[in-house]
């Protein structure tokens, strides 16, 4: 079957939600392209399963208004092509991606969700919001959907640092991967372009931000409680073609307890503080 917004694309909100378990949307019989999608005719679109997994036959990556994914886990695709992160470029006025079990503010949950992985370009206008119970990793440009010259209102990211993550640290003598268990709570941004008016970054652990074009830091980079400092902060703004870039600290609160590393300028000779 299909879910079709009765009011058309200008006014309809479609929200598919499972309150206590998983939410699954399978490909309709004969599906081949997005033109055959079973969900259409919406302004705002939400997939919510904060106590389970959102499982879609493909990642639906756009909405004229708000596009929202909230779940303890994600699966996109089928068979051997299933992915658990967001790998398709996404476009919306407001984009919300939460890999969180239950309430975002609950830091004592017994079974937290994992980390949020976004390896895609994000195009928005009002807000981009990326939250996770573990780590948040963003690899891709964050730009206004109307193109160059405009900025997204707010980039909000939060890593609760609940649970641990397994990190490959090398290989053993037989060529087998070696993993190390580490605490979570890190925010990592690796972008070519960050066209953002205000930042609201919160992390239980470290924050690392890297970009290849001008960046203005306006807003807050803090721990989870109020304006407490993060553990380690790294900001790396260097062009990849040797041209000059600007790193500007406008206003707000940016602090860390252990270390602050700031690198900017052309790739070849960026100074460091």
Image: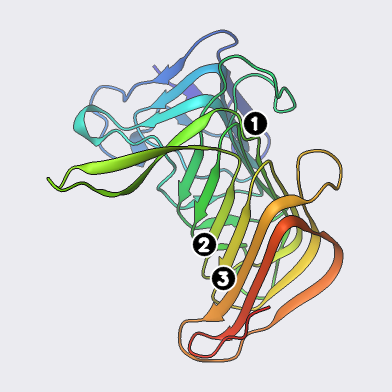
Q: Residue at x 65, y 35 (%)?
A: 160
User: Where 168 falls versus 211 (above or below)?
Assistant: above
| Residue under pointer 2 | 190
The foreground one among 218 and 169 is 169
Q: Secondary structure at mark 3?
A: strand
Q: CA distance from mark 3 to mark 1?
A: 36 Å
- Which numbered tag is attached to residue 12? 1
Residue 132: percent from the left, percent from the top? 59, 35
Residue 270: percent from the left, percent from the top? 57, 86
Counting other residues with Cα less than 10 Å from the Cα at mark 2, is it few (<14), some (14-19), or many (20 or more)? some
Q: Secondary structure at mark 1?
A: loop
Q: Residue at x 70, y 24 (%)?
A: 107
User: Where 255 falls versus 242 (above or below)?
Assistant: above
Q: Identify the image quadrant of the C terminus.
A: bottom right
Residue 207: percent from the left, percent from the top? 64, 54
Counting other residues with Cα less than 10 Å from the Cα at mark 1, is it few (<14), some (14-19), or many (20 or more)? some
Q: Please say whether residue 145 is visible from this viewpoint.
A: no
Image colouring: rainbow
- Which numbered tag is attached to residue 211? 3
Q: Are marks 2 and 1 in contact (CB under 8 Å)?
A: no
């Amino acid at each position: 079957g299909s879910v079709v917004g009765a009011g058309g694309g200008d006014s309809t909100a479609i929200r598919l939600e499972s309150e206590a378990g998983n939410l699954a949307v399978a490909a309709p019989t004969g599906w081949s392209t997005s033109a055959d999608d079973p969900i259409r005719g919406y302004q705002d679109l939400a997939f919510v399963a904060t106590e389970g997994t959102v499982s879609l036959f493909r990642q639906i990556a756009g909405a004229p208004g708000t596009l929202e994914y909230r779940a303890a886990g994600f699966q996109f695709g089928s068979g051997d092509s299933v992915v658990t992160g967001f790998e398709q470029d996404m476009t919306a006025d407001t984009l919300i991606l939460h890999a969180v079990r239950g309430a975002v503010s609950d830091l004592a949950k017994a079974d937290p969700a994992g980390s949020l992985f976004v390896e895609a370009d994000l195009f928005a206008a009002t807000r981009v919001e990326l939250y996770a119970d573990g780590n948040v990793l963003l690899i891709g440009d964050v730009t206004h959907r109307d193109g160059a010259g405009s900025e997204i209102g707010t980039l909000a990211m939060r890593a609760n640092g609940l649970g641990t993550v397994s990190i490959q640290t090398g290989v053993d003598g037989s060529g087998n991967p070696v993993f190390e268990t580490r605490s979570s709570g890190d925010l990592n941004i690796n972008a070519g372009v960050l066209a953002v008016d205000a930042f609201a970054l919160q992390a239980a652990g470290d924050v690392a931000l890297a970009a290849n074009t001008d960046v203005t830091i306006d807003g807050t980079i803090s721990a989870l409680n109020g304006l407490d400092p993060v553990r380690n902060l790294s900001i790396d703004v260097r062009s990849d073609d040797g041209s000059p870039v600007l790193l500007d600290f406008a206003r707000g609160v940016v602090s860390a307890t252990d270390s602050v590393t700031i690198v900017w300028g052309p790739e070849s000779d960026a100074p460091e503080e």
